[in-house]
Amino acid sequence: MRSFEVTILGSGAALPTANRNPTAQFVKCKNRYILIDCGEGTQVQLRKFKCKLQQIDHILISHLHGDHFFGLVGLLSTMNLLGRSQSVNIYGPEALHKIISNQLEVGGARLEFEINFHPLLGNETKLLFEDKCIEIHTFPLKHRIETNGFLIKEKKMPPSLLGEVFKEDKVPLAAIPFFKRFENFTDDNGKIHEFENYIAASIAPKSYAYCSDTSFLPSIAESCKGATVMYHEATFTEIHKDKAKKTNHSTAIDAAKIGVLCNVKTLFLGHFSARYNDTIIHLEEAKTVFKNVFAVEDGDVIQI
Amino acid sequence: MRSFEVTILGSGAALPTANRNPTAQFVKCKNRYILIDCGEGTQVQLRKFKCKLQQIDHILISHLHGDHFFGLVGLLSTMNLLGRSQSVNIYGPEALHKIISNQLEVGGARLEFEINFHPLLGNETKLLFEDKCIEIHTFPLKHRIETNGFLIKEKKMPPSLLGEVFKEDKVPLAAIPFFKRFENFTDDNGKIHEFENYIAASIAPKSYAYCSDTSFLPSIAESCKGATVMYHEATFTEIHKDKAKKTNHSTAIDAAKIGVLCNVKTLFLGHFSARYNDTIIHLEEAKTVFKNVFAVEDGDVIQI
């Protein structure tokens, strides 16, 4: 299993269908587990696609349209019933906090774990969380109500020593701090040991950008330039571009243009309106702008 | 298709599983369409089991534990997106009204149809609705929070004339009101026409009683005596009867005893805890008390 992957739990838009649940994604990054959005039925999708719900430490809610959060209180209740004691971080619009507590209260329920709620304003670009391995950022999207995009990034790992070669060549231990600073080391006999021979080529850190729901918004590039993988909503095809404009959604071409502007390696489209039976047109249209584009299905696992 | 049937949309308890959704039932009675409870995922179950969601005129919510109502706002949103204009009646605890409006409000949504909200107190036995064909009653259950049971009844239909025999015998039209009052009619020539020859044997009206969630509560018989079919929760088996007591739920034997007290024709058990892999023990135990008992599965259609 790769250390950075995204499981698509729901790829539909507002109307759930037999094949497409409303939006939710389970992200595993360096053994950190993150849920992005939580449409109705997400807890069942997590079970279906073998994502362990008690591992989730961070829940990011983009905005308060029902297809992005109606499954949240049910998920929290289930975490509680299954004996969770570990706290969970929720990042979302302020009003969500009250919705959660209100719904639990009317049912007479009290969670046995803590919720650390981090309000999002929908107009900020900022770091939400970091530890030694990952970072989670938010950036504004443009929808009918305040909406947040998210960027999850691996951190650049410190260079690692090639232990066996190091031992074989009998390099003094005193060389290590020099090598880790990418400097050569001169030993007591005046011999120069070159760091390049003993340091593993560092792997470029990867990143995942999540953009749903939004109209065409070039400023996304300010936050997501060079993202390894981007998920961008593509609710409509060109024939419905007026509808996209009116509802502050994107067409597949809008999404592809953002992929180009951000110079991402791979673009995934989702949040398809229930009016389409398949995604052939979405892909045909997007490919006229950006070649490396795919349409997601529920259950897809994206390796980053 | 019979004129009185119940589709089980969810037969599980608080924890949904791959096979059992949380509680919801779709009742068709004399072309009236009623939804009882609406756990998370109900709208997808309605679609899966071919129940037309726009036909629903009455939604009955027993209580405010999430597994009985977390699918409601999503269902209302979907009804709206699909163009509903016809009002819907919702019967449930008062706090539900605010939850609905609050969740729609944070999403900037406005329904294009009216909600007629009828608050339930959880301690009343009363008629909620009647028209010429059906009646809907509520009665109290006993759970950790205020909880309502429901009884849906066909009305006794007025006697119907056997038109062909009536014509053949050339009975005067003036006889009809007499026959409908179960009286004989004497014509101008003094001939007596006996009503029994011209009136169809009236079919006894049927009824469906819904009892979930509740601990063992003999007073249910005051409302449900003689119900044709009863659905009663049976969250636990005898080995967990302490747990049933503590959580104000029923065992399969508790449910069977209520079936006996109410003298129902057929008893259906549901709301099974996710800890059981099957319902063999539930049925074995219930049958020691009441013979005509079945365990429901999602998608079952009960003919009444």
Image: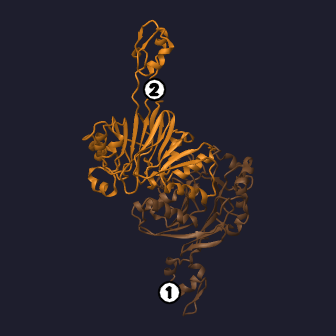
Chain colours: A orange, B brown
Q: Decide if residue B28 is in sight here.
A: no
At 61% from the left and 51% from the top, the residue drawn is B14
Q: Amino acid at mark 2?
A: Pro
Q: Looking at the image, can residue A142 be seen?
A: yes
Chain assignment, label 2: A
Q: Eyeballing the image, is A139 above or below B107?
A: above
- Count of numbered marks: 2
Instruction: Using a 10 Å C-alpha cutoff, classify the residue at mark 1 as few (fewer than 14 neighbours), some (14 to 19) or many (20 or more).
Output: few
Residue B115 vertical placement versus B17 (above, below): below
User: Which mark's residue is nearer the viewer, 1 or 2?
Assistant: 2
The quarter of the rendered structure image containing the C terminus of chain A is: top left
Per the image, the residue denoted by label 2 is A158
Quadrant position of residue B160 = bottom right
Which class describes the residues within 10 Å of circle 2: few (<14), some (14-19), or many (20+)? Answer: few
Secondary structure of the residue carrying tag 1 is helix
Q: Chain of mark 1?
A: B
* Tag shown at residue A256: none
Residues at circles 1 and 2 in contact by the CB criterion of under 8 Å = no
Residue B173 image label: 1
Q: Residue furthest top?
A: A189
Q: Nearer the viewer, residue A280 or B171?
A: A280
Could you tell me the amino acid type at mark 1? Leu
The x, y position of residue A45, in whole percent, is: 50, 44
Query: Which one is nearer the viewer's eye here, A70 or B148?
Result: A70
Locate residue B157 relative to residue B224 in the image: left or right.
left
- Residue at image position (60%, 51%) is B12
Q: Is residue A125 above or below residue A191?
A: below
Left or right: A188 in relation to B5 = left
Find the residue positioned furthest to the left: A288
